[in-house]
Structures are given as C-alpha cells and as structure tokens.
Image (cartoon, grey):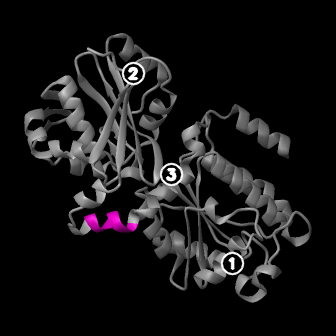
Amino acid sequence: EVAETVIKLCVSGTDGSAKVLVTDLDNVLWAGLAAEDGPDGIKCSSEGIGFRHFVYQSFLARLKANGVLLAAVSRNDLEVARAPITTGKTLLSENDFIEILASYDAKSAHIRRLTESLNLGMDAFVFVDDNPIELAEVGSALPAITCRQFPSQDDKLAQFLNDLNALFARSTISEEDRQRTEMYRRRQTVAAQTSLGKEGTDLTDFLANLQMELVIQDRSSGDRERAVQLINKTNQFNLNGRRVTDDEVSRILSAGGKLYTAKLTDRTGSHGEILVCLVDEHNKILSFVLSCRVFQRRVEHAFTCWIVRRLGNNLAFTYRATERNTPIRDFLKDPAFKIQGEEGRLDGDSFQRDHGKTLELFRLQEVGFERT
C-alpha cells in the first residue's frame, strides 16, 4: 500500500492548491481529552493507542517542513488546549503552528478569522476533525474549505494521509517554503497592530519603527526558481492571474525583458522574497505579484515608485480582474492608474507625487544591477 502511494506521487505532475492545514486537537492530534485526561493522560507516542496520532503528527511535521502552514482549533479553554503541546508531550511544538485557537465558539468562526489574518482565500484551507458534526458545521458555514475526517481505525490511516498529501503536494520545495511558518509567525506578531489600518488608522509611524529594508534584485540572469514559483502561486495581489513557465520567462528575458524581485526584512526578521515583477523588452509590465504576508506595509507603493524611477514615467501593463485579486484591484484604484479593458497605463509623475515619501519607510538596497 505504501509502495502504491509512492508510485502515484512520483508519476503525478500536479501540485496541490492547499496552503494551510487546520487541525482539531482532542482525539486527532492525540488520543484522549485534554480537559479530562490532562497533559499526562493524553496519548500520542509511537506505541499503543497513540500510534495513529503519532503518525499523523509526523506527517504534519513533514508538511510544515515543506512550507505548509499549520493551525489548531479546539472547543476548549485556550490554556487547557495548549497544555499538551506547551509541556512537551507532543511531537509537534507550539512553534510549529502559526496559531492555536480555542474557545467555545463555532470552529468556523476561528477559521474565518484565520483566513482574514493570513490574507488567504478559503480554498487554501483544509480542516481535519474526528467529529462529523464539527465537519458539517465548518462545511456548511465555509463551503470553500476542504474538510476531512480523521480516521477512527488504524487501517484507514494510510488512505487518509494519502488524500491529505495530494491536497498539499509540491513538485519542488524551495528554501522559502521551508521557512514559511517562521515568516508567518513573525507577520502575526504585528498583525494586531497593522489590522488597525482597516479602520483608517494612519500606520506611517508604526511602519517607520519597523526598520524595514527592501532589497531589490535584478534576476534577469541566474537563479529565478523562487520568482517563477511566486508568480504562479500568488493570487490576491496579482496583476492579472497569469501563470508562466520557466521557458516562457527565459524567452522574454532573452528578448531584452527584465525580471525584478524584492526581499523584505524588518526588526522582527526576514520575510524572504515577497515580490516579483516581469517586464518585457518594451518596458511593459507582464506580471506583478506581492505575497499576502506583507500586506499593509506599503511595499507595493515603494516598489512602484522605484520602478517608475528606473523605467520611466509612463508605464504600460497588462491587467485582468480575477475572482481572487481584490487587493491589487484596490491598489489600482489610485488615480495614477488608467485601465481600459486589459490594457493599463501608469502616470508615474502623479504616483510619485502622491506616494514618493513611501520610499522613506524603507532602507533600499539594489543587488545585481550594473553601475552607471
């Protein structure tokens, strides 16, 4: 059965679309009830009744290492729910989860809040629970989320894990993927403060204190694996939803196009490579994407000011509205952008006048550019 699963994975060329696994705790991450059995009474070792849960935790650890975000929800008091994890009784530690959420509210409410704080669509989430009632509640309230029932018998475990693995399968794993949980945890440390921006609060002083550094790199030659990956998996801040192959990017660059990326660091640590911009030989922007984990930091404004200064004040771009790219649609409402159909233009002078000071929020560094 294991061999058949391995063969199926080897011959499959399709990546899964899921990004976040939200798991229940009692009788899923461990056998037993934390509120009744206590941290010492739950079972999740490799022997006895904890075996199935030990295998599941081992599987989650591999998913996390491959870039999948883990979260936990429980109908419980938070400290009770966290106790088995924080006291070291489990294979997974608290740092393996971006959040552990517990209360007596509906689990769908927790998951909805998680989708908002992570700025990810609900179809990026998979929810695992042993209780069919909880699965039905989440499935009814959030129908775009994939729900899976944790098996009650050991002989059902292989198929269950195979199903989950297909949802999260990745053909390539980058260093950025391996660091994703840490990046999102750093992002969550400032999420409560940056969320005030949705209520109209001026975040300029807060952002200035983040000590942000933006490293813009010319990747027109050399390694571009992460850049192509980011274009193809980013949905919300995506200029047109266009997917590209490495061969296609190579042809554009060979014809005189440019590929720019940006990395962001701040006083909380590195957020990795979070922005990609692909430009053709006529300085027309074909792809412009920004990772959702750095929303509200005005990276898009700073980079746009930078690219205007580099390529000129009258830039063309290809735009298409998709079901998921509301954030970039909001960005393009700025009066400096003019769009007709799928063709757009940017009045760089106007944009610089309104947003030029955004660059002052960042220490800017350029890498890979020829000095003139």
First in sequence: mark 1 or mark 2? Answer: 1
Report the predominant secondary structure element of the magenta stretch: helix
| Residue for point 59% across, 51% down | 68
Q: Is 282 or 318 nearer to us in this picture?
A: 282
| Residue for point 28% across, 43% down | 300
User: In this rendering, is residue 13 above or below 208?
Assistant: above
**Label 1 residue SS:** helix
Q: Amino acid at mark 3?
A: Met
Residues under labels 1 and 3: Cα distance? 24 Å
Q: Label 1 neighbourhood size at 10 Å, few (<14), some (14-19), many (20+)? A: some
First in sequence: mark 3 or mark 2? Answer: 3
| Residue for point 34% across, 50% down | 323
Q: Amino acid at mark 1?
A: Ala
| Residue for point 75% across, 89% down | 36
Image depth: mark 3 or mark 2 in front: 2
Is there a contact, CB below 8 Å, between mark 1 and mark 3?
no
Q: Amino acid at mark 2?
A: Gly
Farthest top residue?
A: 255
Residues under labels 1 and 2: Cα distance? 48 Å
